[in-house]
Image (cartoon, grey):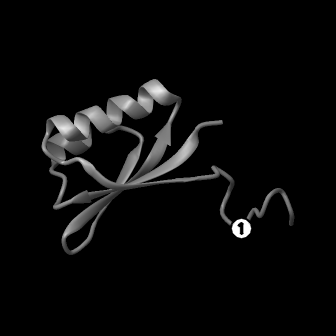
Amino acid sequence: MPELYEFEITGTIGPLIRSCLSGFDTVAETHLTVLTGTATGPADLRRVLDHLDAHGTPALDIRISNHDEPGNRNGAD
């Protein structure tokens, strides 16, 4: 199962760049944008990072989390 990634980007991401990042949700905050989505593997993750770098919006922070459903703590009810 793909892992869930969260990237913090300085500034805001415009509609053109967002359109190239299908599968990622964006949330604009005061001085940064948070992208949240999945990558199917290392090559897909590299593609996203390279795309952000090429547009002058490198990731400041990258977080990886389990792709469990909300409220599901390691399969426990």
Q: Residue at x 64, y 52 (%)?
A: 66
Q: Amino acid at mark 1?
A: Gly
Residue 75 horizontal side relative to residue 23, left or right: right
> Hey, which residue is sitting farthest right in the picture?
76
> Residue under circle 1?
71
Q: Is residue 29 above or below residue 75?
A: below
Q: Based on the displayed image, in which of its 4 quarters is residue 76 positioned?
A: bottom right
Element on which disc 1 rests:
loop
Could you tell me residue 44's position as x and y percent? 43, 28
Q: Residue at x 23, y 65 (%)?
A: 32
Q: Residue at x 53, y 30 (%)?
A: 40
Looking at the picture, tell me which residue is in the foreground, 2 or 60: 60
Could you tell me residue 74's position as x and y percent? 80, 58
Q: Quadrant of the C terminus?
A: bottom right
Residue 12 horizontal side relative to residue 38, left or right: left
Q: Residue at x 24, y 34 (%)?
A: 51
Q: Is residue 15 above or below residue 43?
A: below
